[in-house]
Image: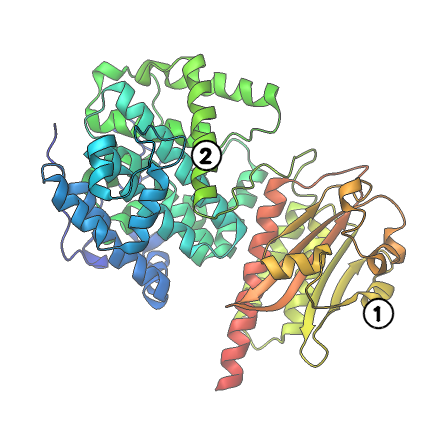
Amino acid sequence: MDQPAPPHGGIELDAICLPGLGRETGAGDWAATPSDASDHSLFVTSIFKKMVAQDSFLSFSRQVSNVNKILTMKYSSAQDIANVILKDMALTSKVLKLVNASFYRHFSSKGISTISEAMIILGTDEVRSAAAGLKIYEMMSGLANAKILKDKSLKGLQRSIMARQIALEGGFKDADSLQISAMIYDLGEYLVALFAPDKYIQIEVVMDDDDTLSLQAASKSILGLSYSDLGRLVALKLHLPENIVNAIRPVTNFSVKGDKISEGDRRRYACAFTREICDIPMDTRDQSMGQIMEITAKYKGVLAIGMSKALELAKTSRDKMIKHAALLNIDPGQDKAISRFPSVKNMDSLTAGLKKIQENLHSQLSIHEIFTKIVETLFESFYFTQVCIAIKKKETQTMDARFAKGNKSQEFLKRFSFKLENRLDIFNHAVLKNRDVIVKDNREKKYKKKIPSWYMDLGENEQAFGLAVFPVFVGQKIISMIVVSWDSNAHSMNQKTLDYLSVFRELMVKTFTLHARKQKR
């Protein structure tokens, strides 16, 4: 068995030099052009500054060392490994909760009460793997301040479950590190969505505009380096083992055979495979079956995974991911929004609007001017019949419409107002639970009592409609919300549209935060 790579020590940003920066496969092919340091150094520096400025990310960085301890204790005693896990009481509790769950094999009718007992019954590797995986997932989901980030954390958890099964059944030398590699495979993409949402949405727009462009090429065209390069730079900065850093480098050459490449490259193909499989929306069986068949054929020469096995991996990893999330009190609500229409109506409007909003963020423009532009951009770029930004009024504890665009928008501005209280209607539910609410069709019975009469009475909503509510919190305080509606006979909410809305919400949070700082000066 390969010796684990030792943790890196003292790597500074200006000293990082990734082998193969911009190179997407170790099988001999290169991306069109390697990244130029002058293209991306400013962006990378800004990301690191934001990481350092955020307390939760500093905590993430410190805790990664505990994960490294767990991962690198391959030849230590079970007691030594148990001691590392036991230092974190919350982690200990979650590990025990996990290993006692019905989907884990266990042989004690009384349940497992200690980490040492879990290692005896399940095996040291299984418990160490569960602890390291939970720790990384806990840290990633803890940073998630938007639905898109929470979804990425859940996808990472699903990839890790799938990767471990592939490693154990495929004869890989180190299942633990492959599991972690798969979990953080999209670390660069995650960081851009977290710290530079405007850049993230620009990359999404570029890909929507040119469906032949790969994710790595699109991100490089906007950032100056690919998502993968950024992820590996940060993974090095966090002192993750080198074999993990290497495994998150993408692949592009699928003409190679598994017995002709190194173990390190085979691990990269395994991680890339889990990414593609886990990204398939499981909303329509025929569509997902076709995509799994296509992906399986592409990787079969390297991984020797057939169609039936790929289907099994997709199902079992998704089921386990949902159960893991439920155990950790996290809502794994995925694939709730089924796409029936293109996500963007007007790309030019979206691109120009986002550029203008970003320029205005750090200018002297008022919140009123910025939010007016946000509403205009959302209305012109997407298939919405009404777009509204409501803001909390402290004196009355009400949420009042302040910006609106759509049919009868002036009437909407006058009449959209509700009291913030402990009620079950969709607007208060979104605030109380800090959760986005999507109504696909107001005619469905389950929404009859949840959409308040005052909203149904608004002139714009005389016909069938879909409705989405996005609460806007700054810190732990509700400040505002985005409300959009659409003709449910013609359209339905698209997941990518939800992602775009999440990014606009992040821009609103940034606007509130920046203006609050100006007022304190």
Q: How is the image coloured?
A: rainbow
Relative to residue 233, is residue 297 depicted above or below? above
Query: Which amino acid type is shown beneath numbered disc 2?
Result: Ser
Left or right relative to 204: residue 178: left
Residue occupying the point 73% across, 41% down: 440
Q: Is residue 361 above or below residue 316?
A: below
The residue that appears at 73% across and 78% down in the rendered structure is 396
Label 2, secondary structure: give it. Answer: loop
Instruction: Quadrant for residue 327, please give it.
Output: top left
Q: Is residue 35 visible?
A: no
What's the residue at 53%, 78% (across, down)? 516
x%, y% of residue 24? Answer: 32, 33
Mark 1 element type: helix
**Which residue is located at x 60 percent, y 41 percent?**
495
Q: Quadrant of residue 249?
A: top left
Residue 495: mark in rendering: none
495 or 225, which lies in front?
495
Number of numbered discs present? 2
**Image coordinates for residue 503, horizontal then vertical, percent:** 56, 54
The image position of residue 67, as x and y in percent, is 24, 48
Q: Nearer the viewer, residue 351 or 285?
A: 285
- What residue does disc 1 label? 414
- Give neighbour class at mark 1: few <14, some 14-19, many 20+ (Cα, 10 Å): few
Say if 333 sits above or below 452 in the image.
above
Q: Identify the residue under disc 2.
A: 214
Give above or below for 311 relative to 504.
Answer: above
Specify which label sits upstream in the sequence, 1 or 2: 2
* Three-letter amino acid code of the residue under disc 1: Lys
